[in-house]
Amino acid sequence: MENDMSDKYVAYVGTYTHEKSRGIHIYDMDVEKGLITERKEVEIDNPSYITLSHDGKYLYSICDAGVSAFRVMPDGDIELINVKSINGMRGCHLSVTKDNTFIFVSGYHDGKLTVMHLNEDGSVGTIADEVFHKGIGSIAERNFRPHISNATLTPDEKLLCVCDLGIDQIKVYEFDKKTGRLDLYDIIRTQLESAPREILFSADGRFAYVMCELKNYIDVYECGVGEDGRRTFEFIQNIFTLRRDHRVNSAATDIMLTKDGEHLLCSNAGDNSVTIYKIDKDNGTLSILSSLPISGDYPKYINLFPDEKHLMSMNHDGNSITFFTVHWDKGLIVMSGREVRISKPNNMVIRKL
């Protein structure tokens, strides 16, 4: 892993603000020790998901009114640029194109995907396209209608893969980089009642990893091109995210890849654990190294420090962030440092100053 100890970093944590939190929390990071110290809190209603532009100049946040745009200052502070309506119920996930011209807003509550223009000054612009998913799932209480939880572009940004855990599908759209318009290209149908929540791609785009929330497993797909020139997603593996005796009353919550593409990590609520996988780079398949407690309740999001020697878990119901030293050679995590108290943490992004 790279050594980034000489560089300075800042971390931003999105939260729900219905209890004690008031908005986005900004932390200074001690990468060498694997610790963070809160600097300030920027007030905004329910910034439940935040993301950075790829150049790090702007931060975007879900809020009750739609999407908020912030300018990132040289010292890591943030300054509000604007707030724009998404013409629907509040979103749950954001992703941005590499050139910072479009932002995708996933709608859990209304099953709506919204594509919005981003302006040169970083502000959120008008709506470029909006798509409502249709269909009926199989679980009456939760999966009875569309719930979009994640929208992720393929590495070449030609296709947008949209996870809908309400109808057990990943809808694949052709993305027009000029207009922002979407056209349905394909549908990946996951297992009944699996609830595909999140999709990640290997850096070279050869493999896709789909975390299924309710079935507690990860589906692995090989991404290729058929004889007719169309993109293909071939299912090649299904692997659990939990230990054998812990597969009841648990839900997979988040996945992430290491920078070198050697490992994948998955957090699990209920079981309150993190599972570490080794990735076979030749065929994309996963093998479990360990599944260990995260020392917090409902680890909704996980992240690694920039040198990837320490792990952080954002524990939504435990109102905490917990810290661990990662021993990749053994596939182990060991708790390090005191937890940081924070009300309803939801996700984190890290920026180099």
Image: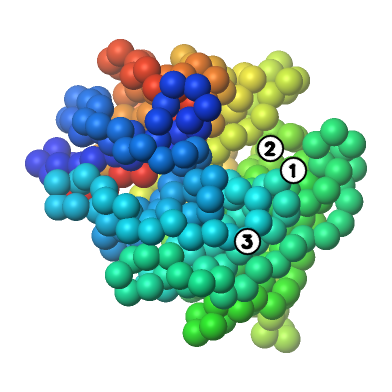
Q: Secondary structure at mark 1?
A: loop
Q: Please provide percent x and percent y for residue 115.
A: 57, 68
Residue pictured at 55% horizontal, 38% vertical:
254
Question: Is 57 on the left-hand or right-hand side of 177?
Answer: left
Q: Secondary structure at mark 2?
A: loop
Q: Nearer the viewer, residue 74 or 245?
A: 74
Q: Please provide percent x and percent y for residue 244.
A: 70, 21
| Residue 117 vertical position relative to residue 303 in the rendered view, above or below | below
What residue is pinned by disc 3? 87
For the residue carrying disc 3, how many other residues have a C-alpha within 10 Å: few (<14), some (14-19), or many (20+)?
Answer: few
For the residue carrying disc 2, how many other residues have a C-alpha within 10 Å: few (<14), some (14-19), or many (20+)?
Answer: many
Looking at the figure, which quarter contains the N terminus?
top left
Give, as a three-letter code, the residue at label 2.
Glu
What residue is pinned by disc 2? 213
Q: Nearer the viewer, residue 216 or 115?
A: 115
Compute the Cα span from label 2 to label 3: 28 Å
Q: Earlier in the sequence, mark 2 or mark 1?
A: 1
What residue is pinned by disc 1? 195
